[in-house]
Structures are given as C-alpha cells and as structure tokens.
C-alpha cells in the first residue's frame, strides 16, 4: 500500500483527487491548515488522515511528509483582478509554497513526486494545437499566470537537481462549485443575472472536467515517467459555442452583444474593487479580458502513456450545469451574493 502525502486536498480539485487516491487502496495523508474545518472533516469521512500544517511552514511539511512513498503537490491559488495584498499572498502560495514542498521532498529523498502545474505556463497558442514540446512565445496575461510560470520553472529546476518529479499541467478546469471565472459566470447565467455582453467570441479554451483531471493526476502518480511533463486537457471549445451550449439549460441571455476587447477592458477595469467590497473575488476585471486568449492544447501524450480519457466539452458543461442546478435548489433562503459563490 502506497503512502501518499497530499497538499491542496480540501480544494476544488483536491477533494476528487483525494477520493481517487483512496480508491486505489492507498493511505492518504492530507496537509490542512484547520483540521476542524468542514472540508477537512469531509476528507476524514472519505478515509484520509488530515495533518495540520501549511505549505509556507517548511517544518510542518517535513513532519507531515515523513514516511510517505509519494508526494502530490496540488495546493495553489487561482484568482484574477487581485489587489497588491492579494498578489503577495498568491506569490507566497503558488511560488514559495511550491519551492517549500519540492525542497522538502528532495531533502527527504522522496522516490516519486507529482506537481500540479498549468498549461497557462505556455501562454496563448493562437489557432494551432500545442503539445508539451512547444515553447512559450506570448506575453504574460495575468498575475496568476506569472506566478504559475515561476513555480513551473522551479519545478523544472528541481527535476534537474535530481528530484524524481512528474509535472502535470491541467487546462481550464470546470465542474460544480467551480471557484474560477467560468464558475462565477455560469452561476450568474443560472441565476438569470448575467448581462448579455461578451467579447472575443472565437477565443477557444481546452476545458477539462474536474473528476477527469483528478483521475489523470492519479494515473500520473501510478504510471507517469519520472522527469516528464503531461498535459491533462480536454477538447477545446470556442466561447460562442460553449455559451450556446449553456442555452440547453434554463438561465439568462439567449443572445449576446459582442463588445470590442478594448471596450470590455475599460468597462471592467473598475469592477474588481467593487466585487471585493461585496465579498466576492474579482471575477469581472480588466485581467479577466486580458487573460482570455486562445489556449488550444493536446493531451495525446497523457492518453498514450497513462491511458487517460476525458469527457467531451459539451458533456462537461451539461454535467456541470445539471449539478449546479441541483445545488441551486438547495440554496433557498440564501441571497444572490451567496448563490454566486461555490457552496461549501
């Protein structure tokens, strides 16, 4: 029985990932800041062990990691439109946290480590479909992207130092209770408050359903070749097409007014501080528009070497919407702001 030390187990990706690791019969120890919090208690209910610590505390990492056969570093923070305080926190979590986890794994002589990076490190792809052999040739479009790039470079440097490390790179992850820009816009649509305004309708993204991603990370932990990078991405889909797919379920606008990209940036530039004052992340911001670039990637390598499969883009959206609709029915009595947030 493999003994796994996991970071980021309480999050959107981490919960199905924990479940997938446990399903193999592996012993899973999850690093959590608060063992009494509901997400941690949910993991204990699955059969995992939660240990108190923080990726910014190297000593707690070493203590939790001791005795493990495998480390899976999944912890990270995604958000757009941050203020300076938020940017500092994101740098700490995404960059310093990754360095701390990988350094501890190296010092403790871990025989196998998996790091969850992101395809955003490759930037925009244009109209081509990219695989792991391509090199970035576009500027950074968000602070999140910059931190993930720095963390990815650190991971590559640890591979060169001799850490037996596999890097997996998801594309845009979707699923019920999604905390990303896509999750918030989808809940706006389902609550019938999404303005009928869009920009860049032909921009495409390679989406991946959260459960499929979790399965891909588990397969990489089992079968991935040390020193390799694997894209875990689904089919790419243009914005105009996934918005059309949303209309298969009841919600807001059925037709859209297309804004010039420059105008959308201006209109959204003042939204970030307003949303933060309302207790929401800045899912509508100038960065939301700037970060909306073509990301067309291929998972052929992961399919070939890991035996990974994934749902079609349309199926991902339909399953996500059906589950969000079911969750919405449980949220009677909540105000609109509460309904826009992921449900605990």
Image (spheres, rainbow, N blue to C red):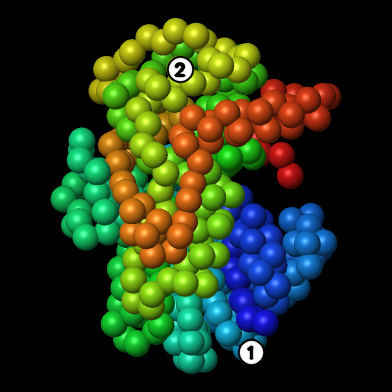
Q: Which mark is residue 187?
A: none
Quarter of image, res 38: bottom right
Q: How many marks?
A: 2
Q: The C terminus is located in which quarter?
A: top right
Q: Residue 194: percent from the left, percent from the top? A: 53, 17
The crowding category of the residue bearing disc 2, from other C-alpha atoms within 10 Å (few below 14, some 14 to 19, many at least 20), is some
Location of mark 2 (residue): 244
Residue 42 in view (yes/no): yes
Quarter of image, res 334: top right
In front of the other: 204 or 101: 204
Location of mark 1 (residue): 67
Q: Is residue 54 above or below residue 282?
A: below
**What SS does tag 2 mark?**
helix
Q: CA distance from mark 2 to mark 1?
A: 50 Å
Q: Residue 120: percent from the left, percent from the top? A: 34, 50
Quarter of image, res 58: bottom right
């Amino acid at each position: 029985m493999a003994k796994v030390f996991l970071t980021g187990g309480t999050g959107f990706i981490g919960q199905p990932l924990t479940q997938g690791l446990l399903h193999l019969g592996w012993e899973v120890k999850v690093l959590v800041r608060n063992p009494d919090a509901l997400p941690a208690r949910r993991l204990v209910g699955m059969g995992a062990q939660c240990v108190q610590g923080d990726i910014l505390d190297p000593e707690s990492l070493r203590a939790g990691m001791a005795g493990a056969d495998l480390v899976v570093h999944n912890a990270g923070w995604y958000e757009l439109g941050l203020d300076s305080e938020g940017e500092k926190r994101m740098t700490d979590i995404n960059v310093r946290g990754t360095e701390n986890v990988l350094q501890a794994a190296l010092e403790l002589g871990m025989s196998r480590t998996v790091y969850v990076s992101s395809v955003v490190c490759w930037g925009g792809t244009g109209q081509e479909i990219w695989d792991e052999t391509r090199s970035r040739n576009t500027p950074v479009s968000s602070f999140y992207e910059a931190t993930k790039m720095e963390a990815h470079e650190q991971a590559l440097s640890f591979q060169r130092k001799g850490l037996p490390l596999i890097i997996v790179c998801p594309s845009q992850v979707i699923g019920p209770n999604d905390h990303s820009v896509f999750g918030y816009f989808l809940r706006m649509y389902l609550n019938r408050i999404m303005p009928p305004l869009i920009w860049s309708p032909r921009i495409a993204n390679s989406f991946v359903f959260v459960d499929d991603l979790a399965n891909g990370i588990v397969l990489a932990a089992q079968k991935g070749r040390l020193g390799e990078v694997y894209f875990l991405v689904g089919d790419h889909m243009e914005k105009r097409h996934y918005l059309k797919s949303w209309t298969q379920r009841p919600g807001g606008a059925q037709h859209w007014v297309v804004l010039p990209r420059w105008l959308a940036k201006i209109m959204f530039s003042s939204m970030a501080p307003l949303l933060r004052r309302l207790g929401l992340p800045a899912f509508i911001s100038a960065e939301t528009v700037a970060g909306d670039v073509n990301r067309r990637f291929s998972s052929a390598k992961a399919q070939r070497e890991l035996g990974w499969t994934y749902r079609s883009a349309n199926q991902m959206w339909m399953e996500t919407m059906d589950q969000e609709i079911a969750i919405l029915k449980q949220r009677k009595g909540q105000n609109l702001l509460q309904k826009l947030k992921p449900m605990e």
